[in-house]
Image: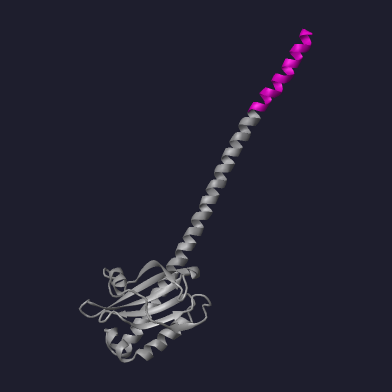
Amino acid sequence: LTRVSIRLKMGIAFPSFALIPVAVAGSLAWYFSSQFMRQAAISELNHHIEVINQRLNDFAESVSTDLKFLLKANSTKHGSSDASMGITSSLETWKRDAWLLMSTRPQYARLTYLSADDYSAYLNLQRDPVTRSTISEQASKHSWYFYSLLVQDLEANETIISPVEYVIPGSDVTFAAFTVALPNRNASGALDGVLIADIFASEI
């Protein structure tokens, strides 16, 4: 009985001791494998973030270029850097330019020019936020004071982006957007107006 008992004990002990290095090796393998997978996931995420950041920068730059082109096109036609004078004298011509730009850029919810003279909208083209297919001109709901504060520290060719939320006309439904503002400054640096592009957040 004693010999049987020792054999039984040895039979239990040897496999138990044999399992220790296996367990240690398995734990180490699991640890290093999980660390490798974690690092691979972080590396892939960082790559995606870089790609997204680059696309956002490109998108923002394209919007800035559109606004600068629209403002420059108006002032060039009238041979003056003071675009507000041109907007007053040939509003319909400038509206056609803006209309063409907006109709080829589905991301724009609205294009507006607010004048510093009377805080009114000389240009206000709006896309239907539901169907996205109709472009219509409506009374401006923009606040001059908001945009004048937004661009007060910007130079003539600088743009700024800010998140906004708009209410769909005739309802309580809202939609998210980004507003991009470009100041129009005269030769002395005073603010003559602000050109604004509102972008559907879903397009970004």
Predominant secondary structure in magenta? helix
Quarter containing the N terminus: top right
| Residue most extreme to the left | 188
In the rendered image of this protein, does residue 56 appear above or below residue 81? above
Segment tinted magenta in the rendering: 1-20
Q: Is residue 157 magenta?
A: no
Q: Position of residue 198 (x, y in %)?
A: 41, 74
Taking the spot 37% from the left edge, 79% from the top edge, the residue there is: 140
Taking the spot 26% from the left edge, 79% from the top edge, the residue there is: 116
In the rendered view, does 5 fall on the left or right side of 82? Answer: right
Q: In front: 59, or 182? A: 182
In the rendered image of this protein, does residue 192 appear above or below residue 14? below
Q: Position of residue 135 (x, y in %)?
A: 47, 83
What is the total number of numbered labels drawn onto the structure image? 0
Tell me the quarter of the picture where residue 141 sits.
bottom left
Q: Is residue 7 magenta?
A: yes
In the rendered image of this protein, does residue 186 appear above or below residue 59? below
Q: Position of residue 63 (x, y in %)?
A: 41, 74
In the rendered view, does 203 fall on the left or right side of 2? Answer: left
Taking the spot 28% from the left edge, 75% from the top edge, the residue there is: 156
In the rendered view, does 137 fall on the left or right side of 186? Answer: right
Q: In front: 166, or 49? A: 166
Q: Position of residue 147 (x, y in %)?
A: 31, 72
